[in-house]
């Protein structure tokens, strides 16, 4: 984002870390350190290799300005929903993090580590909307936002020289270990780390929580709109996609691929979108790979086994997740009943598809075929697998806290509904940093601000105590097999029993075609 010219720089603040001395800035009473390297730059021969430790630095390193974001596709002027999700400069040397802390003292505050989403191809931990000011100040927390490799640099591997897949996950593990080793000097408690993420970042959060190298490091996780319904490939299933990418990039060998400028790799991503997009499915040209080495199982499974079974979990979704990608698309708006029924058959089988269509149609007044399709995609990718996690943990010693975000966007005559990502500015409660986002236009300020206070307060309470309840909201009980309590965040905040019951029951009956 553009910065105001000729402004007086904020006062400096310095801190000694195990890695070296940092000079950050004092911003509105918070100590802020930006573009702090947590791993060696993954450039040259280190492209696509697991994150390596950063060698540290001598002298005092300036940490007063954001560094480059991970290379990604970029369109001037942004998109019609978010208005953009990552801005130049971009550079492969991007494995850095930003820290907001009330003080570089020994107060040992709870730590919130944020992992941005973006369909595995976009986003940045230094986006103003993901700034940690409100959490650090109002929650007396230490907030850490990270950059990590995305798109072809994070979710592709040359697969020729024995290197493992999933560079993105190695980056996040390196960041988590950096926090563990350095956060005490920044006023945080290394034994009280909550990891939170949205969308692809929520998948990352779950993968981290269940990773052997993260055992004992994470106390809590917050999963905002995790697309746990994604069918994550193994290396064999992914190979066709990586072969297509090689062809699009015009390089075959690992040596040739490493010699390409990152701009050429990002340029080939658009072609991979075109080749991998299927009608009625969320486009994901790059995906995490369940290789049995770096990622042992689907991330949703990771939260049910081993050490991760003891981690506190908050999970939620928005009511109309899929409207983010499809609600403004004229081609989808013109979908016919027949085509949507055929898409349903791919999940439920041809025999059951008409009845499933009818069930979705009956659940939404005046539903068009496009509405049925969007509700189906929302259920398949987000709501039903999230409820499935809650169901599985319901009667364990560590059930989950579940929520649904229902506030409808007023923009575009309401066609977005409560779309994917809409809860983000409410959770961060920093709407001035989201002023570029079209999907917030027209929301009544009083409703907006009241809901944001409630949500941010719940997130802070959960990070601090493992319980999101606070005096400004109705009682929020954990999701158990009897009540299935789910908090509904809307202009009125209400705890409801079995809020997603219709979707849950419908999909319990689904079978492969």
Image (cartoon, rainbow, N blue to C red):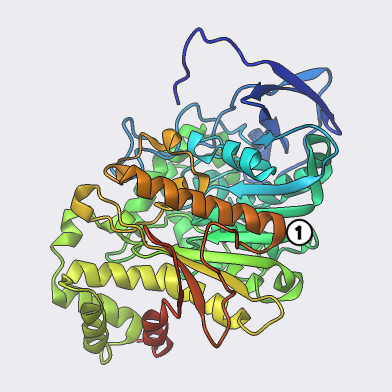
Quadrant of the image occupied by residue 314: bottom right
Q: Is residue 474 above or below residue 360?
A: above
- Category of crowding for the residue at label 1, using alpha-carbon neighbours closer than 10 angstroms: few (below 14), some (14–19), many (at least 20): some
The residue indicated by pointer 1 is 214
Of 471 and 239, which appears nearest the observer?
471
Quadrant of the image occupied by residue 133: top right
Of 510 and 33, which appears nearest the observer?
33
Q: Is residue 86 above or below residue 276?
A: above
Q: Is residue 493 visible?
A: yes
- Of helix, strand and loop, which one carries label 1? helix
Q: Is residue 56 above or below residue 191?
A: above
Residue 458 x/y as whole percent: 57, 57
Residue 489 x/y as whole percent: 43, 61
Left or right placement of residue 101 versus residue 265 in this view: right
Give the residue drawn at x 57%, y 62%.
289
Residue situated furthest top in the rendering: 6
Residue 347 x/y as whole percent: 35, 80
Quadrant, the C terminus: bottom left
Give the residue drawn at x 73%, y 53%.
193
Left or right placement of residue 215 versus residue 500 in this view: right
Give the residue drawn at x 59%, y 27%.
67
Q: Is residue 380 above or below residue 417?
A: below
Give the residue drawn at x 16%, y 70%.
368
Left or right placement of residue 259 versus residue 231 in this view: right
Quadrant, the N terminus: top left
Left or right placement of residue 282 versus residue 26 in this view: left
Residue 130 x/y as whole percent: 53, 40
């Amino acid at each position: 984002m553009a910065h105001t010219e000729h402004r007086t720089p904020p006062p400096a603040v310095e801190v000694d870390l195990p890695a070296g001395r940092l000079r950050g800035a004092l911003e509105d009473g918070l100590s802020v350190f930006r573009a702090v390297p947590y791993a060696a730059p993954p450039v040259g021969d280190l492209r696509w290799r697991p994150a390596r430790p950063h060698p540290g630095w001598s002298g005092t390193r300036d940490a007063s300005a954001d560094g480059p974001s991970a290379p990604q596709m970029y369109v001037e002027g942004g998109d019609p929903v978010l208005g953009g999700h990552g801005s130049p400069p971009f550079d492969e040397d991007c494995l850095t993090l930003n820290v907001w802390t009330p003080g570089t003292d020994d107060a040992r505050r709870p730590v919130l580590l944020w992992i941005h989403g973006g369909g595995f191809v976009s986003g940045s931990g230094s986006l103003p909307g993901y700034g940690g000011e409100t959490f650090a100040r109002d929650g007396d927390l230490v907030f850490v936002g990270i950059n990590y490799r995305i798109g072809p640099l994070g979710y592709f591997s040359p697969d020729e020289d024995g290197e493992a897949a999933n560079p993105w996950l190695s980056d996040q593990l390196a960041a988590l270990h950096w926090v563990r080793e350095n956060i005490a000097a920044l006023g945080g408690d290394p034994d009280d780390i909550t990891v939170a993420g949205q969308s692809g970042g929520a998948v990352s959060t779950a993968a981290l929580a269940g990773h052997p190298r993260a055992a004992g490091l994470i106390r809590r996780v917050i999963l905002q709109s995790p697309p746990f319904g994604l069918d994550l490939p193994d290396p064999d299933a992914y190979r066709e996609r990586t072969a297509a990418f090689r062809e699009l990039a015009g390089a075959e060998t690992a040596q040739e691929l490493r010699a390409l400028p990152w701009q050429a790799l990002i340029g080939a991503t658009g072609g991979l979108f075109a080749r991998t997009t299927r009608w009625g499915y969320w486009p994901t040209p790059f995906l995490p790979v369940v290789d049995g080495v770096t990622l042992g199982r689907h991330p949703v499974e990771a939260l049910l086994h081993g050490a991760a079974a003891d981690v506190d979990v908050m999970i939620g979704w928005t009511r109309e997740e899929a409207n983010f990608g499809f609600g403004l698309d004229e081609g989808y708006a013109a979908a016919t009943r027949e085509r949507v029924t055929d898409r349903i058959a791919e999940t439920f089988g041809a025999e059951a598809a008409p009845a499933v269509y009818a069930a979705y149609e009956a659940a939404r007044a005046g539903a068009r075929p496009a509405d049925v399709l969007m509700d189906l995609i929302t259920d398949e990718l987000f709501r039903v697998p999230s409820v499935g996690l809650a169901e599985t943990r319901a009667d364990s010693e560590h059930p989950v806290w579940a929520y649904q975000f229902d506030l409808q966007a007023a923009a575009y005559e309401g066609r977005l509904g409560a779309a994917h990502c809409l809860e983000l500015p409410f959770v961060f409660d920093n709407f001035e940093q989201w002023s570029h986002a079209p999907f917030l236009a027209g929301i009544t300020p009083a409703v907006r601000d009241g809901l944001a206070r409630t949500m941010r307060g719940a997130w802070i309470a959960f990070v601090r105590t493992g319980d999101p309840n606070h005096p400004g909201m109705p009682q929020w009980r954990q999701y158990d097999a009897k009540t299935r309590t789910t908090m509904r965040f809307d202009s009125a905040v209400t705890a409801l029993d079995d809020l997603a019951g219709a979707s849950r029951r419908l999909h319990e009956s689904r079978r492969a075609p």
